[in-house]
Image (cartoon, rainbow, N blue to C red):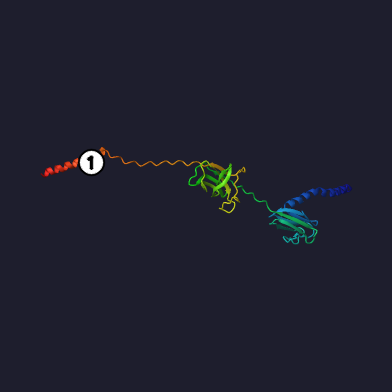
Amino acid sequence: MSRSIRPLAILAAVLLPAALAPALGAGAERHAAGKVVTIKDFEFAPAELTITAGDTITWENNGPRPHTATSLDGTFDSGNLDAGQTFSATFANAGTFIYACRYHDIMQGTITVVAPAPTPTAAPTGQVTASDQPVVGGAITLAQVSAGQASWVVAQLDQGGKPGKVLGQTLVKAGTNANVQIRLSQAVDVGARLWLLLRLDAGTPGSYEFPGPDGPVHATGGQIVMQQISVTAAPARRASPAPPASPPRTGAMLLPLGILALLLAGGLLALRMRRH
Protein backbone atom coordinates (compact mmCIF):
# COMPACT_ATOMS: atom_id res chain seq x y z
CA MET A 1 0.00 0.00 0.00
CA SER A 2 2.84 2.36 0.72
CA ARG A 3 4.13 1.98 -2.82
CA SER A 4 0.76 3.10 -4.29
CA ILE A 5 0.48 6.15 -2.02
CA ARG A 6 3.90 7.53 -2.96
CA PRO A 7 3.08 8.16 -6.67
CA LEU A 8 -0.16 9.87 -5.65
CA ALA A 9 1.69 12.16 -3.28
CA ILE A 10 4.16 13.08 -6.00
CA LEU A 11 1.32 13.78 -8.43
CA ALA A 12 -0.43 16.02 -5.87
CA ALA A 13 2.77 17.94 -5.23
CA VAL A 14 3.05 18.64 -8.96
CA LEU A 15 -0.61 19.51 -9.63
CA LEU A 16 -1.43 21.52 -6.51
CA PRO A 17 0.84 24.54 -7.27
CA ALA A 18 -0.51 24.63 -10.82
CA ALA A 19 -4.06 24.66 -9.51
CA LEU A 20 -3.30 27.45 -7.04
CA ALA A 21 -1.45 29.65 -9.55
CA PRO A 22 -4.58 31.37 -11.01
CA ALA A 23 -5.85 32.12 -7.52
CA LEU A 24 -2.53 33.68 -6.51
CA GLY A 25 -2.50 35.76 -9.67
CA ALA A 26 -6.01 37.02 -9.01
CA GLY A 27 -4.97 37.90 -5.46
CA ALA A 28 -2.05 39.94 -6.79
CA GLU A 29 -4.39 41.81 -9.12
CA ARG A 30 -6.72 42.59 -6.23
CA HIS A 31 -3.80 43.96 -4.22
CA ALA A 32 -2.83 46.21 -7.15
CA ALA A 33 -6.38 47.45 -7.48
CA GLY A 34 -6.33 48.18 -3.75
CA LYS A 35 -3.20 50.34 -4.18
CA VAL A 36 -0.88 47.81 -2.60
CA VAL A 37 2.57 47.00 -4.00
CA THR A 38 4.03 43.65 -3.03
CA ILE A 39 7.83 43.27 -2.68
CA LYS A 40 9.08 39.75 -3.40
CA ASP A 41 11.47 37.87 -5.61
CA PHE A 42 13.53 41.04 -6.15
CA GLU A 43 10.68 42.95 -7.82
CA PHE A 44 7.84 45.34 -7.10
CA ALA A 45 4.45 43.96 -8.13
CA PRO A 46 2.93 45.73 -9.90
CA ALA A 47 5.98 47.58 -11.17
CA GLU A 48 3.80 50.32 -12.70
CA LEU A 49 0.77 51.74 -10.95
CA THR A 50 -1.54 54.66 -11.82
CA ILE A 51 -3.44 56.36 -9.01
CA THR A 52 -5.39 59.56 -8.40
CA ALA A 53 -4.00 62.49 -6.42
CA GLY A 54 -4.89 61.96 -2.78
CA ASP A 55 -4.56 58.16 -2.95
CA THR A 56 -2.30 56.15 -0.65
CA ILE A 57 0.00 53.28 -1.69
CA THR A 58 1.20 50.60 0.75
CA TRP A 59 4.31 48.51 0.09
CA GLU A 60 4.40 45.04 1.68
CA ASN A 61 7.66 43.10 1.93
CA ASN A 62 6.60 39.50 1.43
CA GLY A 63 10.10 38.27 0.65
CA PRO A 64 12.75 36.81 2.93
CA ARG A 65 15.26 39.66 2.44
CA PRO A 66 15.10 43.33 3.48
CA HIS A 67 14.26 45.94 0.81
CA THR A 68 13.38 49.63 0.48
CA ALA A 69 11.02 51.67 -1.68
CA THR A 70 12.92 54.90 -2.33
CA SER A 71 11.90 57.51 -4.93
CA LEU A 72 14.69 58.89 -7.09
CA ASP A 73 13.59 62.49 -6.47
CA GLY A 74 13.35 62.10 -2.70
CA THR A 75 9.57 62.33 -2.53
CA PHE A 76 9.29 59.22 -0.35
CA ASP A 77 11.60 56.66 1.28
CA SER A 78 10.41 53.63 3.19
CA GLY A 79 13.71 52.98 4.87
CA ASN A 80 14.59 49.40 5.67
CA LEU A 81 11.68 46.99 5.31
CA ASP A 82 12.30 43.57 6.80
CA ALA A 83 10.17 40.60 5.90
CA GLY A 84 6.55 41.25 6.84
CA GLN A 85 6.95 45.01 7.29
CA THR A 86 4.92 47.63 5.38
CA PHE A 87 5.30 51.28 4.36
CA SER A 88 2.60 53.71 3.14
CA ALA A 89 2.81 57.03 1.28
CA THR A 90 0.06 59.43 0.20
CA PHE A 91 0.47 61.28 -3.09
CA ALA A 92 -1.12 64.73 -3.01
CA ASN A 93 0.13 66.07 -6.35
CA ALA A 94 -0.03 64.77 -9.90
CA GLY A 95 3.19 63.57 -11.49
CA THR A 96 5.36 60.55 -12.27
CA PHE A 97 7.53 59.07 -9.53
CA ILE A 98 10.24 56.49 -10.24
CA TYR A 99 11.53 54.54 -7.27
CA ALA A 100 13.90 51.65 -6.56
CA CYS A 101 15.31 49.48 -3.80
CA ARG A 102 18.50 50.98 -2.34
CA TYR A 103 19.84 47.49 -1.72
CA HIS A 104 19.02 46.07 -5.13
CA ASP A 105 19.09 48.61 -7.97
CA ILE A 106 17.57 46.12 -10.38
CA MET A 107 14.30 46.54 -8.49
CA GLN A 108 12.48 49.58 -9.91
CA GLY A 109 8.90 50.81 -10.06
CA THR A 110 6.87 53.75 -11.39
CA ILE A 111 3.95 55.55 -9.78
CA THR A 112 1.83 57.76 -12.06
CA VAL A 113 -0.42 60.19 -10.20
CA VAL A 114 -3.20 61.87 -12.17
CA ALA A 115 -5.32 64.82 -11.08
CA PRO A 116 -8.83 63.94 -9.91
CA ALA A 117 -11.66 64.59 -12.33
CA PRO A 118 -13.34 67.93 -11.69
CA THR A 119 -16.54 67.77 -9.72
CA PRO A 120 -19.43 68.45 -12.08
CA THR A 121 -21.34 71.58 -11.22
CA ALA A 122 -24.97 72.23 -11.93
CA ALA A 123 -25.48 74.24 -15.09
CA PRO A 124 -26.84 77.73 -14.43
CA THR A 125 -30.52 78.07 -15.24
CA GLY A 126 -33.04 80.86 -15.40
CA GLN A 127 -36.25 82.22 -16.87
CA VAL A 128 -37.43 85.59 -18.16
CA THR A 129 -41.12 86.51 -18.04
CA ALA A 130 -42.40 89.72 -19.67
CA SER A 131 -45.25 90.90 -21.89
CA ASP A 132 -45.71 93.43 -24.70
CA GLN A 133 -45.72 96.90 -23.20
CA PRO A 134 -45.09 100.61 -23.78
CA VAL A 135 -41.86 102.30 -22.76
CA VAL A 136 -42.69 104.28 -19.63
CA GLY A 137 -40.23 106.84 -18.36
CA GLY A 138 -37.57 105.45 -20.68
CA ALA A 139 -37.77 101.94 -19.18
CA ILE A 140 -39.50 98.60 -19.59
CA THR A 141 -40.59 96.29 -16.77
CA LEU A 142 -40.20 92.51 -16.65
CA ALA A 143 -42.79 90.73 -14.53
CA GLN A 144 -40.30 88.17 -13.23
CA VAL A 145 -36.70 87.03 -13.71
CA SER A 146 -35.45 83.78 -12.17
CA ALA A 147 -31.70 83.11 -12.04
CA GLY A 148 -29.60 80.28 -10.66
CA GLN A 149 -26.86 82.76 -9.80
CA ALA A 150 -26.22 86.48 -10.11
CA SER A 151 -26.97 87.38 -13.72
CA TRP A 152 -27.66 90.23 -16.10
CA VAL A 153 -31.01 90.61 -17.82
CA VAL A 154 -30.33 92.48 -21.05
CA ALA A 155 -32.61 94.29 -23.50
CA GLN A 156 -31.44 94.13 -27.11
CA LEU A 157 -33.06 95.59 -30.21
CA ASP A 158 -34.25 93.05 -32.77
CA GLN A 159 -32.08 92.91 -35.87
CA GLY A 160 -33.22 90.56 -38.59
CA GLY A 161 -34.97 88.26 -36.15
CA LYS A 162 -31.98 88.08 -33.80
CA PRO A 163 -30.76 90.09 -30.80
CA GLY A 164 -28.88 93.15 -31.99
CA LYS A 165 -27.84 96.39 -30.32
CA VAL A 166 -27.80 96.37 -26.52
CA LEU A 167 -30.15 99.04 -25.17
CA GLY A 168 -29.77 98.37 -21.45
CA GLN A 169 -29.13 95.82 -18.74
CA THR A 170 -29.95 95.23 -15.08
CA LEU A 171 -28.17 92.97 -12.57
CA VAL A 172 -30.42 90.50 -10.74
CA LYS A 173 -29.58 88.33 -7.75
CA ALA A 174 -29.85 84.54 -7.59
CA GLY A 175 -33.43 83.46 -7.05
CA THR A 176 -36.70 85.06 -8.12
CA ASN A 177 -36.79 88.78 -8.93
CA ALA A 178 -40.15 90.53 -9.51
CA ASN A 179 -40.87 93.74 -11.45
CA VAL A 180 -37.37 94.13 -12.86
CA GLN A 181 -36.87 97.39 -14.74
CA ILE A 182 -34.42 97.95 -17.59
CA ARG A 183 -33.72 101.56 -18.51
CA LEU A 184 -33.21 101.94 -22.26
CA SER A 185 -30.37 104.01 -23.68
CA GLN A 186 -32.46 105.36 -26.58
CA ALA A 187 -36.05 105.93 -27.65
CA VAL A 188 -37.77 102.97 -29.27
CA ASP A 189 -40.54 103.25 -31.84
CA VAL A 190 -43.95 101.71 -31.23
CA GLY A 191 -44.01 98.29 -32.88
CA ALA A 192 -40.29 97.67 -32.41
CA ARG A 193 -39.32 94.28 -31.02
CA LEU A 194 -36.97 93.77 -28.09
CA TRP A 195 -35.09 90.65 -27.03
CA LEU A 196 -34.72 90.05 -23.30
CA LEU A 197 -31.72 87.80 -22.58
CA LEU A 198 -30.27 86.36 -19.38
CA ARG A 199 -26.46 86.47 -19.13
CA LEU A 200 -24.18 85.25 -16.36
CA ASP A 201 -22.29 87.76 -14.26
CA ALA A 202 -19.22 85.59 -14.83
CA GLY A 203 -16.48 88.21 -15.03
CA THR A 204 -15.86 91.05 -12.61
CA PRO A 205 -18.84 90.95 -10.21
CA GLY A 206 -21.29 93.76 -10.92
CA SER A 207 -19.63 94.80 -14.19
CA TYR A 208 -21.38 93.98 -17.47
CA GLU A 209 -18.77 92.43 -19.75
CA PHE A 210 -20.09 91.44 -23.14
CA PRO A 211 -18.46 90.77 -25.49
CA GLY A 212 -16.49 89.05 -22.76
CA PRO A 213 -17.02 86.52 -19.99
CA ASP A 214 -20.69 87.33 -19.36
CA GLY A 215 -22.06 84.68 -21.67
CA PRO A 216 -25.70 83.65 -22.11
CA VAL A 217 -27.55 81.31 -19.77
CA HIS A 218 -28.82 78.14 -21.44
CA ALA A 219 -31.96 76.24 -20.56
CA THR A 220 -32.03 72.48 -20.02
CA GLY A 221 -32.44 71.78 -23.73
CA GLY A 222 -29.49 74.00 -24.63
CA GLN A 223 -31.53 76.99 -25.82
CA ILE A 224 -30.52 80.47 -24.69
CA VAL A 225 -32.82 81.86 -21.99
CA MET A 226 -34.50 84.81 -23.71
CA GLN A 227 -37.90 86.24 -24.67
CA GLN A 228 -39.09 88.64 -27.34
CA ILE A 229 -41.61 91.42 -26.68
CA SER A 230 -43.09 94.24 -28.76
CA VAL A 231 -43.25 97.90 -27.82
CA THR A 232 -46.85 99.12 -27.70
CA ALA A 233 -48.30 102.61 -27.65
CA ALA A 234 -48.83 104.29 -24.34
CA PRO A 235 -52.50 104.56 -23.37
CA ALA A 236 -54.11 107.94 -24.21
CA ARG A 237 -54.49 110.26 -21.27
CA ARG A 238 -58.04 111.28 -20.32
CA ALA A 239 -58.71 115.06 -20.30
CA SER A 240 -59.46 116.46 -16.85
CA PRO A 241 -63.06 117.73 -16.55
CA ALA A 242 -63.43 121.57 -16.56
CA PRO A 243 -64.56 123.13 -13.27
CA PRO A 244 -68.27 124.06 -13.23
CA ALA A 245 -69.03 127.65 -14.32
CA SER A 246 -70.65 130.05 -11.86
CA PRO A 247 -74.43 130.03 -12.43
CA PRO A 248 -75.81 133.32 -13.86
CA ARG A 249 -77.86 135.48 -11.64
CA THR A 250 -81.55 135.21 -12.44
CA GLY A 251 -84.75 136.92 -11.31
CA ALA A 252 -85.34 134.06 -8.92
CA MET A 253 -82.13 135.00 -7.13
CA LEU A 254 -82.91 138.77 -7.18
CA LEU A 255 -86.45 138.33 -5.84
CA PRO A 256 -85.49 137.70 -2.22
CA LEU A 257 -83.31 140.81 -2.28
CA GLY A 258 -86.24 142.96 -3.49
CA ILE A 259 -88.52 141.62 -0.82
CA LEU A 260 -85.91 142.35 1.79
CA ALA A 261 -85.60 145.94 0.56
CA LEU A 262 -89.38 146.45 0.74
CA LEU A 263 -89.49 145.08 4.25
CA LEU A 264 -86.75 147.46 5.34
CA ALA A 265 -88.54 150.46 3.72
CA GLY A 266 -91.82 149.50 5.38
CA GLY A 267 -90.19 149.27 8.74
CA LEU A 268 -88.63 152.73 8.41
CA LEU A 269 -91.99 154.24 7.40
CA ALA A 270 -93.77 152.71 10.39
CA LEU A 271 -91.09 154.04 12.73
CA ARG A 272 -91.57 157.62 11.47
CA MET A 273 -95.33 157.48 11.86
CA ARG A 274 -94.98 156.48 15.55
CA ARG A 275 -92.75 159.46 16.22
CA HIS A 276 -95.30 161.87 14.83
Q: In the rendered view, does 256 fall on the left or right side of 221?
A: left
Residue 58 is situated, as x and y percent measured from the top left of the image, at 73, 56
Figure quadrant of residue 63: bottom right
Q: In the rendered view, does 167 fall on the left or right side of 120?
A: left
The residue that appears at 58% across and 48% down in the rendered structure is 199
Callout 1: few (<14), some (14-19), or many (20+) C-alpha neighbours within 10 Å?
Answer: few
Seen in the picture, residue 37 relative to 265 is either above or below; the reply is below
Residue 178 is situated, as x and y percent measured from the top left of the image, at 51, 46
SS type, badge 1: helix
Disc count in the image?
A: 1
Residue placed under numbered mark 1 in the picture: 257
Q: In the rendered view, does 101 fall on the left or right side of 224?
A: right
Quick one: 237 or 11, which is closer to the camera? 237
Return the residue found at the far left: 276
Figure quadrant of residue 86: bottom right
Return the residue found at the far right: 3
Say which quadrant the C terminus sits in.
top left
The three-letter code of the residue at mark 1 reads Leu
Residue 249 is situated, as x and y percent measured from the top left of the image, at 28, 40
Quick one: 149 or 71, which is closer to the camera? 149
Residue 204 is situated, as x and y percent measured from the top left of the image, at 58, 54
The residue that appears at 79% across and 48% down in the rendered structure is 22
